[in-house]
Amino acid sequence: MLRVMMISFLPVLLLACGSPAEKKKDTVPQSSPVQFSALSPKQKAYYESAIKPLYKSMLERTGFNGSILLAKNGEVVFEDYRGYANLSTKEPITESTTFHVASVSKTFTASVILRMMEQGRLQLSDPVEKYIPTFPYANITIKDLLTHRSGLPKYDHFMDNTRTEVTRVKNKKGRWVTRTKTYRIPVQVSGFATNYTVLQYMIDKRPPIEALPNRRYNYCNTNYAMLALVIEKISGLSYPKYMQDSVFRPLNMQHSFVFSIADTANYQPSYNYNNSVFKLDKLDCVYGDKNVYSTVRDLLQWDKALYEGTFIKPETQQLAYQPYSHETRGVRNYGLGWHLVLNPGEPPVIYHNGWWHGNNAVFKRMITDTATVIILGNKFNRNIWAAGKMSSALTGKADTTQVETDQ
């Protein structure tokens, strides 16, 4: 979890004197397509001058190795490409360098499911076994998977030689609380696992659930690995093929793809903070929860499609931006494939972060201000998540929210 970080800077003062930034207080997510208004050269220069000092202090000075893009009204106002795609060969990072976007992939999987709902091919209330007949857990719906309320065990635990047990105990004050313990277990899986390997493991081993369905929010990658299988069952195509044909190509995301077991010979290395290489892992071929590779410019295309309602309808997006973790106190919540920050009286923040091995990512959307921050890195840098707060330069107010660091 990242600590709260206050950002103060000169542009906030400039806003009070008639800067190009727009002040909006509407807290209701969009319910109609956005009609972008073009930025003037003066506005673009203003935003760029506000962003540069933040970028320098928050990323450039911290060894950032990756790509960054900030957009306002669908237009790029700042971007930079820094470091190496491959530290051994010194191949430079460019605008066409793809990065593993980790859990930002969930925004695609969720939106495809919602599009299939619009097409009448599924309902969110449908049980999972309607599409995956061998699914071994009862009373879990598509919506439970989308909202992380299924109670399913985490495949990245039970297939990685660990087991998680969740118990309810009384604390010192006599209140019932949830406690989670993780244990090492014998090696269960060898070779590369796929989504079907995960499903078969759950069929054969029945790892215990962590909660009853729709009882509580528990972020779990298994949910989205199963949603990818639902997409395959309905479409008759592999998830990578469906995404290429129905998402990336139509939206002109020219450099985006889904990594699968067929791509292991072309694996792109990622790095830890100390430059050590993350080698190809047995869980690297499971998709839906992760494994979309993209660029900051391609993700801007995705962002624009959402604003303009060209992939799923605005009213469907509004459904996705509603909070479903009602038992969780505080302003942070989860919708349908999106993290939410819902401060009373303030515009909503719709976002997803990501982490997988050395890759970490930020995809942050201030939809009331039509402002977006996209940051992708292939060398682990915790500051990437904190740098999502550079949104302040686009909205005119300090970003003091806490955000999740996702797996």
Image: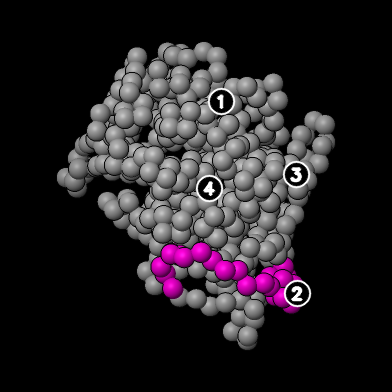
What amino acid type should be assigned to the residue bearing mark 1?
Cys
User: Start and end of the magenta stretch?
Assistant: 26-50
Pointer 2: residues within 10 angstroms few (<14), some, or many (20+)? Answer: few
Pointer 1: residues within 10 angstroms few (<14), some, or many (20+)? Answer: many
Sooner in the amino-acid sequence: mark 3 or mark 2: 2
**Magenta stretch: includes residue 324:** no
Residue 221 appears anywhere in the view: no
Sooner in the amino-acid sequence: mark 4 or mark 3: 3
Residue 145 appears anywhere in the view: yes
Rendered position, 234 above or below 342: above
According to the picture, the residue beneath numbered tag 2 turns out to be 41
According to the picture, the residue beneath numbered tag 3 turns out to be 96
Sooner in the amino-acid sequence: mark 2 or mark 1: 2
What amino acid type should be assigned to the residue bearing mark 3?
Ser
In whole angstroms, how far apart are the C-alphas of marks 3 and 2?
A: 25 Å
In whole angstroms, how far apart are the C-alphas of marks 4 and 3?
A: 21 Å
According to the picture, the residue beneath numbered tag 1 turns out to be 285
Identify the residue at horizontal 37%, vertical 60% (top origin): 331
Left or right: 389 as drawn, with respect to 64: left
Q: Quadrant of residue 141?
A: top left
* Camera-side residue of 21 and 164: 21
Sooner in the amino-acid sequence: mark 1 or mark 3: 3
Left or right: 203 as drawn, with respect to 268: left
What amino acid type should be assigned to the residue bearing mark 2?
Pro
What amino acid type should be assigned to the residue bearing mark 4?
Asn
In whole angstroms, how far apart are the C-alphas of marks 1 and 3?
A: 23 Å
Residue 6 position within the rendered picture, expressed as x and y whole percent measured from the top left: 54, 65
According to the picture, the residue beneath numbered tag 4 turns out to be 353
Q: Quadrant of residue 133?
A: top left
Pointer 3: residues within 10 angstroms few (<14), some, or many (20+)? Answer: some
Sooner in the amino-acid sequence: mark 4 or mark 2: 2
